[in-house]
Image (tube, rainbow, N blue to C red):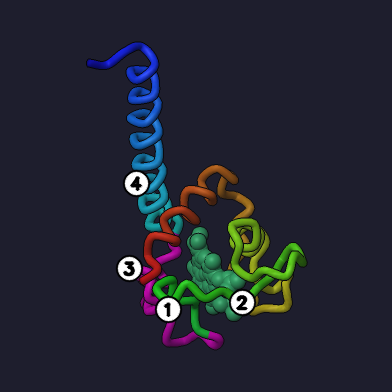
Amino acid sequence: MLNKKNTIILTVIIVLTLFSASLLADGKALYNSSGCGTCHGATGLGDGPAAAALNPKPRSFESGEFVYDTDGDGVKGSDADLLNVMKNGSAKYGGSPTMPGRADIPEEDLKAIIAYIRTLQK
Ligand code: HEC
């Protein structure tokens, strides 16, 4: 039988599961509506229609390898690093101006996109 404590725990688990599922759904929709796929590809392989003309190539999110340590903590590609690159563009961190800064996208939405990008890693 479910006592009160277990009912509360179960409710919390269900709410958190629904919340993370909706974050991922939002992230995918936002990735698509923000034009990331033009360069990074519809499925994040770095093979979008514009990729052929770009050097360096847009990152493939399948590898999960990232280049910039934007906050100087010695770790590349942390959530904070990806957020900075997406917000400010990679030129600010010594990279290519072809990775555009999207400070126009709300930070919560950028975080949802990061959560989605993480799921593309194989
Ligand atoms: C016009 C093409 C273009 C578009 C649009 C674009 N990117 Fe990029 N992106 C690039 C290129 C090129 C690089 C590699 C830049 C470099 O090495 O300096 C890159 C790199 C990245 C990186 C890797 C940073 C690292 O530390 O390695 C992330 C994350 C990223 N892009 C996310 C996004 C997201 C999310 C969007 C959509 C909001 C987006 N990009 C839109 C071209 C693009």
Q: Position of residue 100 (x, y in %)?
A: 59, 67
Q: Earlier in the sequence, mark 4 or mark 2?
A: 4
Kind of element beneath mark 1: loop
In the rendered view, tell whether residue 35 sits above or below residue 57: above
The type of residue carrying mark 2 is Val
**How far separated are the C-alphas under marks 1 and 4?**
25 Å
> What residue does disc 2 label?
67
Task: Determine which quarter of the picture holds residue 26.
Answer: top left
**For disc 1, does the CB lie below 8 Å from ligand 1?**
yes
Kind of element beneath mark 4: helix
Look at discs 2 and 3 and give the one toward the viewer.
Answer: 2
Q: Looking at the magenta stretch, what is its main secondary structure?
A: loop
Per the rendering, the mark at residue 43 is 3
Q: Give the residue at x 54% y 88%.
A: 55
> What residue does disc 1 label?
50
**How far separated are the C-alphas under marks 1 and 3?**
14 Å
**For disc 2, does the CB lie below 8 Å from ligand 1?**
yes
Q: Earlier in the sequence, mark 4 or mark 3?
A: 4
The type of residue carrying mark 1 is Ala
